[in-house]
Amino acid sequence: MSAVTKICLVRHGETAWNAERRLQGHEDIPLNALGERQAQAAALALRHTRFDAIYSSDLVRAMRTAQTIAAPHALPVHSDARLRERHFGALQGLTRDEADARLPGEYARFRCLEPDACPPGGGEALARFAQRVHGALDALATRHAGQQILLVSHGGCLDVIYRLVTGKPLETARDFPLGNATLNWIEQRHAIWRLVEWDARQHLDRSADELPI
């Protein structure tokens, strides 16, 4: 029987820009007070869960969340830039309304989930972003075959991972939640992914979902 590799996925705690509904992308925004409490609640919920390794996006909002969860386990947090949010180019820092007003054509293509559309200003195409995240996930699953690991990342990253695991196309509108600091479990056996549990939030008082694009 092939060993099962289990992964717990956690989106970072809330930031001020989450609360303001701003596109963050690669902008390095820290957790706000609620985000800190959410990270602590996730740490409490996972304190008795065994992990063989913990990985995080290198952006501060994810690293802070991961370090808070890692503390009871006495495990280091391995920083991995491949787990960063998608780069939104000139859309970063804008609310959805601001993006629609200032860059209506570009934002329309972004909102319609065109896989090869690159936001202006050095943005990352959705298909290329998904390829980056899938590559990181597969590499870490191979490195930790038969083990249980924690990955702390971003809403966009969890979005493309959910689609990979369930077979949902990138171009399809999202119909699943992506809450801050919720717990999401997937597993791999014989190179086949399976969704175990998604968006468990019993440990949280509040968790805002990532807004649909």
Image: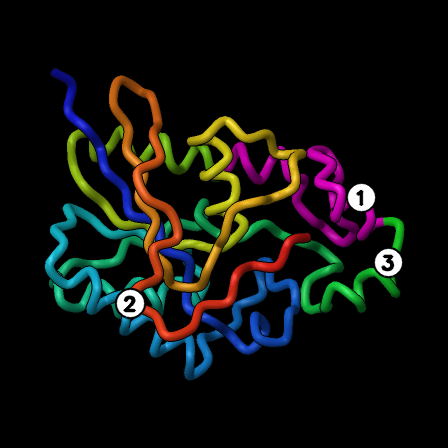
Residue to which mark 1 is pinned: 109
Inter-mark Cα distance, 1 to 3: 10 Å
Tell me which amino acid carries mark 1.
Arg
Considering the numbered disc 3 on the image, is that residue within a helix, a strand or a loop? loop
Inter-mark Cα distance, 1 to 2: 37 Å
How many numbered marks does the figure carry? 3
The residue at 52%/61% (across/down) is 209
The residue at 58%/65% (across/down) is 27
Considering the numbered disc 2 on the image, is that residue within a helix, a strand or a loop? loop
Tell me which amino acid carries mark 3.
Leu
Residue to which mark 2 is pinned: 203
Task: Pick whichever of labels 1 and 2 is earlier in the sequence.
Answer: 1
Closer to the eye: label 2 or 3: 2
Could you say where residue 42 lies in the image, as x and y percent from the top left? 28, 65
Tell me which amino acid carries mark 2.
His
Task: Pick whichever of labels 1 and 3 is earlier in the sequence.
Answer: 3
Image: magenta residue range: 106-132
The residue at 74%/48% (across/down) is 111
